[in-house]
Amino acid sequence: MRWALAGSVALLTGLLVGILAGTLDRATAQGAADAPQAAVIVELPEEPGILSVGLPFEVLVEITGSAEAGPRFPRWRQRWGDAEIVSVAAVEEQEIPGEEADGESTRQLATLYRQRLTLRVFRPGPAVLPPVAIFAGERPGDEPTLTPAATVEIAALLPPDAAGPLPPVPPKPLPGVSGLWLAGLLLVIVTTASLAYLYRQHFAAAGPGTPGEELLQALVNLRRRAPDPVAFHHDLSHALRRFLGRTLRFDGERASTRQVERVLSIAGIPTRRREPAANLLRQCDAVRFGGHPSTRQVMVGRLAAARKLANAWALPASLEEDRGAP
């Protein structure tokens, strides 16, 4: 009786162990089937049908995952292994339907996610695309799925029967220069230099006119242009400084207003000539640097003052005193 009971217990224990083992095997197989599967598919171009140096080609990165949480693809940079990334398309989704346990209805069991990349390689030989990590869920602690490593064979652009690099091309001799061409070239150079010299001599002899004539012409140009107040006072100040510099033989265009006043004082210019010039320069500086407003009527008045100054400086001091006397 005791032996029969022991045999029954052993039989029941064996049955239970077998059932548990089968359940665990089915669960493991189901888990392996539900685990995300990643793949890398290289698409060859239709023409010429091979991958050569610098020729763009497309690669599909695919992974299956649940419909509830989509995978997180890598943040692609400029390169993937030996290849340069030209462009990255958006992630596409495709439903994978399946059957229920009773086989009567279908439902979505998983989703296929794919992303298309355009790559190119600039050296012949095998180009390796190393594994990259794709996370199946949105949780930070999810285990990533690695894509399989892929190797792409890049063909060289040289013909297949070329044993090595082509020999260098021997240099070609330059065409000879005849004496007639050399004489013609020298004649053109001498003629151009002579014309340039005569041009400079003509304008150097003519000159820009007297300082007063140049100032009056600048004032006429200012009245014709009628620019904005800042540009008007900038050009007027430049014309006055050039006039004073040419008259007193100093660099008036680069001198400040205070330096111009000092030169006028040292040169012994009378007050009736020195003060109008200094006042005009100060008024121009107030608009240029101080932001003082100026109207068209004010600008016309300053043009008239500058014209009067040019005419007064053109006269000898004694004649100016006689014209100013009652």
Image (tube, rainbow, N blue to C red):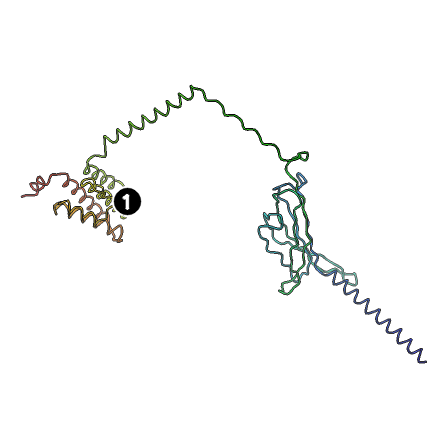
Q: Amino acid at mark 1?
A: Pro
User: Which residue is outermost to the top?
Assistant: 180
* 64 left or right, relative to 19: left
> Where in the figure is residue 183, as x and y percent of width and height?
40, 20
**Residue bearing the label numbered 1:** 227
- Image quarter of residue 104: bottom right
Residues 50 and 231: in front is 50
Q: Residue at x 88, y 76 (%)?
A: 9
Indicate whether 70 appears above or below 232. Answer: below
* 326 left or right, relative to 243: left
Residues 13 and 88: in front is 13
* 113 left or right, relative to 16: left
Kindly state the secondary structure of the residue where label 1 is placed: loop
> Where in the figure is residue 216, as x and y percent of width and height?
20, 39
Looking at the rendered image, the quarter that the C terminus falls into is top left
Indicate whether 314 appears above or below 34. Answer: above
